[in-house]
Amino acid sequence: MLVFQSIILGIVQGLAEFIPISSSAHLVIIPWLFGWNNPTLTSLTFDVALHLGTLLAVLVFFASDWARLVGAWFKSVFQFKIGDDPDRRMAWYLVLACIPGGISGVLLESKIGQAFHSDPIPKGSMLFMVGAIALLALLLWLADKLATHRRAFGKIKARDALYIGLAQAFAVIPGVSRSGSTITAGLALGLEREAAARFSFLLSAPIIAGAGLKSLYDLLKQVKAGVIAGTELAIFPIGFVAAAISGFLCIKFLLAYLKKHSTAVFVWYRFALAALVLIVALARG
């Protein structure tokens, strides 16, 4: 049963990390709905596996982009020049956009963990999540409905990167969604849907890497202290592979989907999810 649950949560992580429906919310909601109370599923080990799986997905999918961007960034540092090179500019835009999210993660990570990773999860925390899910759905709908959708990926400016980065800072709250907040901000700034998603996905790599490395450091300390259970280590590769495969396929699907479709289906899904969680939370008292 634990293997099955870890596969399901790995798939969910890979899908919801990139689709604007909030992976952190789903990783809280699914065990909460089905009564999966095995502490291994909420362990630091499993968290690391999921983070590293989605990181691998975005690195592999955008491998050629990362090769150019990383090379351009180092050239800009060594030559002390950005100039008109679009790859150098984009590399620095990604660095700029990461700063707000990194700060919010450091400041709020422990408080978020206390509110949403206790057993049982307080009803107040679930109701707060309901509000976050619904509010982001409304903002995503408005941004997509009112946006011009005229600016291509190459037209992104430093100001856009900063605003998108500020939006990502709110993604530390379960229910907001990292991809949801950044895609919403990109659409509000007039980016094409595919361009907003592409920048969001590229931006996810440093953030996921930062969170994953922090968790990996904490995990290694626990391994050294001998407090890691064997079952936790056993499901590490399961969660990693499931998240990596589903994440890769999700990125490929979403970039193609948003070239021809709006984000409406994700908006209505978020509203339905908020309603479901609200009903269950109230019914359980």
Image (cartoon, rainbow, N blue to C red):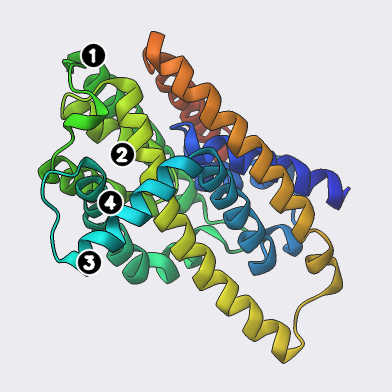
Identity of the residue drawn at 58% across and 78% down = 218
First in sequence: mark 1 vs mark 3: 3
Q: Nearer the viewer, residue 158 or 69?
A: 69
Q: Quadrant of residue 176?
A: top left
First in sequence: mark 2 vs mark 4: 4
Whole-number angstrom distance, CA of label 4 to CA of label 1:
30 Å
Identity of the residue drawn at 63% across and 38% down = 12
Mark 3 lies on residue: 77
Query: Which x, y percent locates residue 63?
Result: 50, 44
Helix, strand or loop at mark 4: helix
Tell whether label 3 touches label 1 (CB within 8 Å): no
Whole-number angstrom distance, CA of label 2 to CA of label 4:
17 Å
Which disc is residue 91 wearing? Answer: 4
Q: Nearer the viewer, mark 1 or mark 3?
A: 3
Identity of the residue drawn at 59% across and 72% down = 216
Whole-number angstrom distance, CA of label 1 to CA of label 2:
16 Å
